[in-house]
Image (spheres, helix red, strand yellow):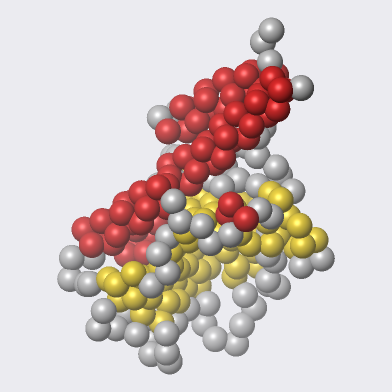
Amino acid sequence: MFHRTSMMAAIAAAVLTSLLLSAPGSAQNPEMPSEGWEWTETWDWVEDEHTKAAQAEQEDLLEKMNPDLEFTPGSTVHRAQQYTDPDRDNRVIRMFYGDWVVEGRPEAVGVFTVLPGGWKPGVKYGEWDPSRLIHCPDAEYEVTCEKGVRQEYRWAYVETKWHIQAVKFLRDGSAVSVVWYTMGSEEIEADVDQVMELTEAIGTVPVWKAWWSDFTESVRVAEGTSAGS
């Protein structure tokens, strides 16, 4: 008999293949929970082969795209979870996160690669919303907020004297966010083009592979349970 779990695995394999090959597809795939993921220990500051691949990729890009700067890892890339709503503590956004200190400057760079599920694309203006990846606050200090569309993704950035955040929202429903910020009162030396180019270059393949690894493991467990019943 052709088990439902086998069918789900076949569908997921097709989805992952299309993502890794950057083939056109829908922005949301049916395995992604729009209201957010359930909290799990497997995404609670966990490092594995997929986070290590992301670490290597992002460090290589930082060095190649900023040859005059040196970067020291702060928080190594790891699986992370962020609650989507303070009133609903069981639904989270799943992502990879890592950061680096810029040597010789009071600055650091944080990189988020985010799976679909639990967040909305676009810029949130005004009050902070945990279901948004980027915010344009009402503030007394100067804030520049811009957004637009390129062929393969939507983009947005927010710039102040102390930080620049850029986000790209990909067609497969995932996203990349880079935050370059000061760790003191000094004004930031990085510029928008620098942060946007880095954001554009960083991919989401490792975080998708982590999702795939989890999914195939759940299918294996389900099939083993079914076979034993």
Q: Quadrant of residue 33?
A: top right
| Up-down relation of residue 44 to residue 14 (above or below) | below
Residue 73 image position (x, y, % from top left): 34, 69
| Up-down relation of residue 147 to residue 184 (above or below) | above
Q: Name the residue located 44 percent from the left edge and 82 percent from the top edge.
A: 162
Q: Residue furthest left?
A: 68
Q: Residue furthest front?
A: 228
Q: Quadrant of residue 192?
A: bottom left
Residue 178 image position (x, y, % from top left): 44, 63
Q: Residue furthest top?
A: 1
Q: Is residue 58 visible?
A: yes
Residue 87 image position (x, y, % from top left): 82, 65
Q: Name the residue located 32 percent from the left edge and 65 percent from the top edge.
A: 194
* Quadrant where the N terminus is found in the figure: top right
**Left or right: where 46 falls relative to 31:** left
**Closer to the camera, 54 or 29?**
54
**Closer to the camera, 225 or 135?**
225
Figure disc tally: 0
| Up-down relation of residue 46 to residue 209 (above or below) | below
**Closer to the camera, 152 or 51?**
51
Q: Is residue 190 visible?
A: no
**Left or right: where 46 falls relative to 2:** left
Residue 157 image position (x, y, % from top left): 48, 63
* Quadrant where the C terminus is found in the figure: top right
Q: Residue furthest bottom?
A: 185
Q: Name the residue located 22 percent from the left edge and 72 percent from the top edge.
A: 69
